[in-house]
Amino acid sequence: MSEPADVSFLLGAVYAAEWSNDVRELLFSPAPGEGGLSLAEGFDLLDVGSSPPPKELIPLCVIDEASIAVVVSEGPAAGTVRRWFLDPVPPEHQCGLLDLHPVLYVSSLERELSARGAGLSRILDEIGPAYADSHLKHEKRPRTFVLRPIRVACQNVIVGLAAIAQEASIDGLAVLAWQTCEVPHVATHEANRALAVITLCDAFQNGGTMEVRFDHPATLNVDGKKVRYSGHPEGAVPASLRRFARTVGVQLGAEDPASISPREARELFRVITPMPDELRARVDTAIATAGIKPERVYYTLLKPIWRAIELDWLLAISSRAASILEGGADWTQRSARQSEAEACRTAVMAGMFFRRINATDAAAADGSTRVVEDRTRGIQWSIEPESATIAFRGLDNTSPVPWARETVVPTTERVVVAFRSFVDSGTTEALQQAASEHLAILAVPRGTSLPDGLPDDVIVIFCPDRLADLDKAVEANLTSARISRA
Amino acid sequence: MSREELVAVALTPDEDLKLLISDIESARARAAKALAGDRVDVVRFEALSSQLEQLSFARRSHGALEVKLPVSANPPPLITAQEPADLAFLPAAWRERFADALEAGAVLVTLRSPLNHGTTNAQPRKAVEPPSPADPWKSKTGARGAGAVQERFDAQIKSALDGRGGSLSPSDIQNAILTETLRTYVGAHGKRVNLPVEYRDGSRSRHPFPLRSLTLADAPLKDAEELRFAFLSIRHTEMDAVIDGAFLRNAEISQPRPAADTDDLVFEISREQLRALTDDGATPVHLQIYQTGLDTAIVGFYRAVVCHLLEHPHSLSVTPMFFQGGKHHQSKSGDERRNGRDRAAESKQPAKSAEYREGAVWAAK
């Protein structure tokens, strides 16, 4: 798709094809029919947008009131379909990948829109009310085989709806409804990603093969009447989900168009689990060499049992990470448990410290409404496995380091922290070495007695939790890991 | 990875340390006796052990007797003079010094710390590949619903019995299918196979399930004491009018814990209760069990039934009663319930027995 000629050919194919009214109304076409949009109108929209678009963008169709789909006509990304926001958005969200080429995109739109009405009324008029009646009204938790509605919303706008149930007869998940939409304040494909995360986490939690089927029949009791569904209204892996999967390099429905096979589920699970590059490399290595089930690692992060920095720490510093991810050694194996406990409690401390330094939420500081989503500083971490320390980058040099007894302001680009509950001479030596170039910090639980002779240039900070509190948090995480598959 | 280090430290205990050690010993004893999945005493033992380890680390720097051990060693975490232990895990040159210290009243604590500077010196392990994704399951006969579940469970057991590997995986198998399929294979002809039981959370029961282990009868024991039990208490209180009791306590069984722990717990409780009910096999008893669909409890209970029948073949028969849909029973007032009990006693049938189906009896020939 690197030649401009391909783009003309693909766009020609789009313009020449017969589309439903729903699609025709959204498409920018050189010869729009009645009620259609012209290419010129598309270019006008691009021009009046808040930021000037690159000249190689060709408008393809309307996405929502603040963004349009465009096709890249030249360059390395030629032929791809992107989302151009007309309102100001952070640069990393502008021009997000929507699909690999315009024919695929418009065809998938056609399929998606043709089933949207049926899917919406199924969820909103049948499955939702039936579930409210059978479970919500009685404050009853659903068993895995119960058909459960899922709703994903962002700032009070619903961006995803689904209905799923574990099906013992296929030992997999049956999906009766699954649909998403793009809205102006949510990043490209984020609704698809969020709903895919919920779906795959549910499939993992329920046990089974991880197969997700979209053609499995189900019967529902709605107001005393039996309603029978023959599967998802599209009868196959939904077009929006396949489109999203294509953008992340995964082909869904390749083995069976109506199913995400366990192999495809594993691939999709991997790419939709957000991880910094360093952690992703560690996760891939651990999976390849330590026999860890990949789905367990992704679920661990997404639930989250262990947060990204915590898991990164465990994988980087402990040869017992595989055991920890499965819930840890038996309590009777105290020696192994001792090592795991220290790795885990320092992970919990690191996680607490990171959340504290990465947060920007100043509660009602300016008296206006608080938006707490995505309010992070973007602090980066990097783990030094041999010294078992974490280097943080991007700390605000006007804010004091948290948990310190005296005010300390980061004066260096990197801040190196050793999280420990037992301090030995090796730790102090490593920190002393780090202190020659960076701010070096020793973080210990509250109430820890420190050894004599700590170097003056090493700052000691005290986690607000005592050792026993940290161990309680560790126990909760390990218990979750042990019983995560119901 | 950082380097793990293992050291043995001899500490001279003061009063506080003695008290801590005594608390650890008591917590360890209680934790060992706790029911499967009950973590209260385990957590207490671990918290106290952590305190001891923190204290020991602090005292190391004050000249305590200590020696490094190979990280592959697996020494006991705590040795006191009261509990003499084999010190073979210590380097030969150090054994006598530690033995003397112990004799003089010291305690030996082993400390394993994972965050020492350097690359990991754990035993190099052979790379283990992750398990492959499962194969999707599809009925070979085109069965759907319960028929497909039956076919899947059946295929799974057959494959394990034919020596093609695998284990009994009862998670998510419906109550009646699970019970009846297990019965079929317990009474099947052939060489006895003790099949491991593995649940979908990855936990494995301590006790395998004995298949092809009994010759089963078609009818319950004659002249046996008849008892009706709900499988689990509290689940369906409407049944109280028609049952003699509940076989298992819901509060003990329905706890968040690895599935195999629940199976083991139910097995152990059931073994004990069946022994008590039959007076160690001396009194014949016929049980009607009104079942709920908790797979772990079903496997644990019927394993106990099989083991009991293997020991005392003519002391027990069990008829599973499967709920057939609709409401279990209408809630009744106290008087109505008492009347219901009278009526049920007269007919020797539950008040609304039509809602239950009698399963095939578990009794030895």
Image (cartoon, rainbow, N blue to C red):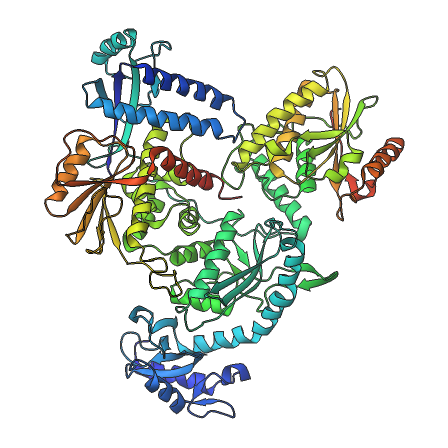
Q: Which residue is the extreme one toward the front?
A: A367
Instruction: Tell me where residue A105 appears, x and y as whole percent.
Output: 44, 75
Identify the image quadrant of residue A448: top left
The total of numbered circles placed on residues is: 0
Q: Residue A51 in the image: state x and y as whole percent.
A: 30, 80
Q: Residue at x 86, y 31 (%)?
A: B345
Please name the residue shown 39% across and 28% down the image. B47
Q: Does B169 sit above or below residue A252?
A: above
- Left or right side of A454 for A342: right
Q: Quadrant of the N terminus of chain B?
A: top left
- Report the residue that reaches farthest toward the left: A436
- Which residue is at the front of the view, A478 or B316? A478
Q: Position of residue A132 (x, y in %)?
A: 64, 58
In the figure, is residue A384 to the left or right of A331? left
Looking at the image, which is closer to me, B208 or B106? B106
Q: What residue is rendered at 62% in x and 49% in y?
A: A140
Tell me if B359 is positioned left or right of A2 in this view: right
From where the camera sits, is residue B69 visible? Answer: no
Measured as percent of width and height from the top left, residue A115 is found at: 57, 72
> Can residue B327 be seen here?
yes
User: Does residue A119 sit above or below B163 in this rendering?
Assistant: below
- The residue located at (25%, 12%) in the rendering is B98
The quarter of the rendered structure image containing the C terminus of chain B is: top right
